[in-house]
Image (cartoon, helix red, strand yellow):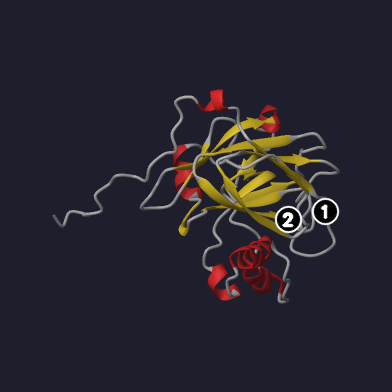
Amino acid sequence: MTKPAHTTPPPDAAARRRALPVVTYSVIEGPQVDDLNLWNAHDLTERFYSGKTRALHATHLSTGDRLWSTFPTLRPMATITHDTLDRYGWDEDGAGVHDIIGTRCDPYTNLLLKGREYHYCCHSNLTRALATERNLPLEEAEVHVHDVMNVFMCTGYTRDTHQYFMKASPVRPGDFIEFFAEIDLLVGLSACPGGDCGASHSDDTAKCYPLKVEVHRPHERALAGWQSPPPNKYSRSHGTR
């Protein structure tokens, strides 16, 4: 368990070890979307699996939903224990908050669509953060960066063409989302260069704000009967024995 800590991450990204705490991300100055990656702190190949989480829960997450890990471990990595934006629900456009359908802004797609390089997309921010935290070459760190949970992001699918869309996040100072880490985690967080993602994206024109990160030690009585989930027990024989 970690002791309480209060930090404001830099605007690009943050990655820290979180050994079974309660972690809270709070907006303190202005609306800001953030891209979240989770890894097993002891094994980077076990990481957040957005597709399976989406299948087990929904396209957008809130209180009580769990963030699941990749095969072959397939277990809860974290559980959302509080979300002040659960009040938002679904709006008139069919949009919700905290999506796991958008992958993350990245320099490859940006170059494809705009014809120029931009180095501070969330993918690059997370890559630099992981490389720094684990003292890895950028190329080695990058392969571990994965599809994110878009914290505070407001998204949906258009009703006519069913295409992904973004709109300005409704998050305001004082709003927060809280996670309970089910296993020892390494957490990467990127403050999206799109700010509230209501207009510009993957450039430096949007207004961005810091995010407050708090790590709390749960009361022992709150953990009564709780056990960290073991890896999935499937034999991995795949019909060969």
The answer to whether any part of residue 193 appears in the image is: yes
In the rendered picture of this protein, how many numbered marks are placed on residues? 2
Q: Nearer the viewer, residue 65 or 169?
A: 65
Tell me which residue sits at (53%, 72%) in the image. Answer: 140
Amino acid type assigned to the residue bearing label 2 in the image: Cys
**What is the x, y in percent for residue 222?**
55, 25
Number of residues whose C-alpha sits closer than 10 Å to that of mark 2, classed few (under 14), some (14–19) or many (20 or more) = many
Q: Nearer the viewer, residue 218 or 72?
A: 218
Mark number displayed over residue 192: 2
Tell me which residue sits at (29%, 44%) in the image. Answer: 233
**What is the x, y in percent for residue 219?**
60, 27
Among the 4 quarters of the image, the one containing residue 240:
bottom left
Measured Cα–Cα span from mark 1 to mark 2: 8 Å
Residue under label 1, please give it.
208
Among the 4 quarters of the image, the one containing residue 225:
top left
Decide: marks 1, 2 in contact (CB < 8 A)? yes
Disc 1, SS: loop
Is 104 rendered above or below residue 181? below
For the N terminus, the image quarter is: top right
Q: Nearer the viewer, residue 140 or 86?
A: 140
Q: Nearer the viewer, residue 221 or 132?
A: 221
Is residue 167 toward the left or the right of residue 23 in the image?
Answer: right
